[in-house]
Amino acid sequence: MEARAVVPPQPRGAGKGKNEAGQGRNRRALGDIGNLEGVRDLEGKPQAQISRPMTRSLHAQLLAKAQGAVETNKNPVVPAVDNRVANNRKRAVVKKAAEAQKNVIDKPKSDTVTAKTSDEGEKIESVSGRESREGSSRKEVKTLTSILTARSKQAACGVTVNPKQQIVNIDAADLNNELAVVEYIDDMYEFYKLAESESRVRDYMDSQPDMNARMRSILIDWLTEVHCKFELMPETLYLTINIVDRYLSMQFVSRRELQLVGIASMVIACKYEEVWAPQIEDFICLSDYAYAREQILVMEKAILEKLEWYLTVPTPYVFLLRFIKASVSPDKEMENMVFFLAELGLMHYPTVILYCPSMIAAAAVYAAQCTLDKSPFWSETLKHHTGYSEEQLMDCAKLLVSCHSAAAESKLKVIYRKFSNPERGAVALFTPAKCFQAT
């Protein structure tokens, strides 16, 4: 067996002399890549040695910069030996430049501060100067969020100030109510105003030789009683009257079928508006079995075909909800008075023929304000949301007040008894508006 070769121990430091000349070529991976040679400062203290290659041109360039900085600033210069040192120096210079810019008061137009460093000698723009130019270059862009935020702030104030008038924001309390659709409620009512002309009832009494306006009022009075008996929603009654009038304006109806038209119209309105619609047998019972089930179904189909299934129409009730809200401080008494006058107007044939649904609703609000002596009778807010001035509503309001004056003596007392009930504020018992009686 051969013996292993023994390597004789070597003393420390041996072999350094051989590689000393090439020491600059050996450096650790991922180390400092500044590639600067360590030099002695002006006081002769040695700098930290950096094991990295050094070219002659870079060495000469660094020494020239150091000597130039000493002659210019007359301050001791420490050449940069590390990227971190250089970065710290840059941040310090930027900070001093920003402080100098802040202290300059007599020169507001100056946007930059020039600071010469020992190793760079470059101009550094102050932070404030950059921000001012960046701010001036940015253009204000309106987004949906900014628009909605502005609307919310405007609604929180409650009042939209106009140079000539003050209009109360009636939707300020409903900003968080998604069902109120505050963002486009005004557009919806503009559409209703345009659509009401399509479904407006024309004068049809001349084309119905077998009936007259009095018979129509009797039918509406009876339908109102049925509506109260079933405890239906208010919009059901308004839609029923609209369907009756539109059908009568298109189709001849005999006196014997007039009540049948009213029953079929209410059946259609209940199916459209109510969650739980009454059964047809209930209507047969209330009509004292005047019609059979098959007759009601046939008339229902005939009405729908004649109207071409067009049931989504703006009735006065649609506008009443908005206009009552526009009266700014509506109470239950005010609301009951408006509905009382509106229903009296719908039972009165000339009112339905002469005026559109939005004007009937606006006139009912105006007449109610006058009856309850609420000042002002017609505000700028009401004018804005209804689209009608006080002068435009005067004739229709006079007609409604005259209906109120004659209600107590009329033989058709269903609406009068309905609103004489204390549950509805007994508003039918109030004295009609005196301002209209005087004229």
Image (cartoon, rainbow, N blue to C red):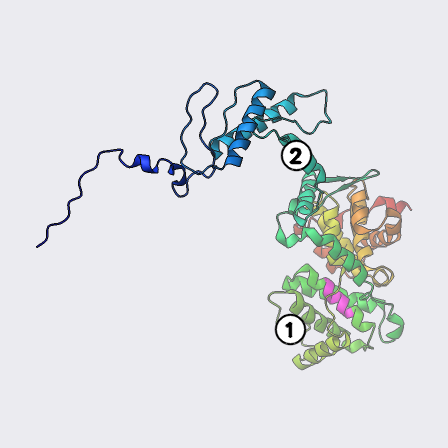
Residue 347: in sight, yes or no? no
Badge 1 local density, few (<14 within 10 Å), some, or many (20+)?
few
Which residue ends up furthest to the front in the rendered image? 18
What is the quadrant of residue 247 in the picture?
A: bottom right
Name the residue that disc number 2 marks.
130
Front in this rendered view, residue 286 or 148: 148
Which residue ends up furthest to the right in the rendered image? 439
First in residue order: circle 1 vs circle 2 = 2
Q: Select label 1 or label 2 by which is in front.
A: 2
Front in this rendered view, residue 5 or 159: 5
Is residue 372 covered in magenta? no
Which residue ends up furthest to the left in the rendered image? 1
Residue 342, horizontal then vertical, whole percent:
77, 56
Badge 2 local density, few (<14 within 10 Å), some, or many (20+)?
few
What is the quadrant of residue 245 in the picture?
A: bottom right
Tell me: 186 left or right of 56.
Answer: right
Point 38% across, 41% down: residue: 28
What amino acid is found at the position of numbered circle 1 in the picture?
Cys
Which element carries disc 1, helix, strand or loop? helix
Tell me: 80 left or right of 365.
Answer: left
Magenta region: 238-244
Res 53 label: none
Name the residue that disc number 1 marks.
285
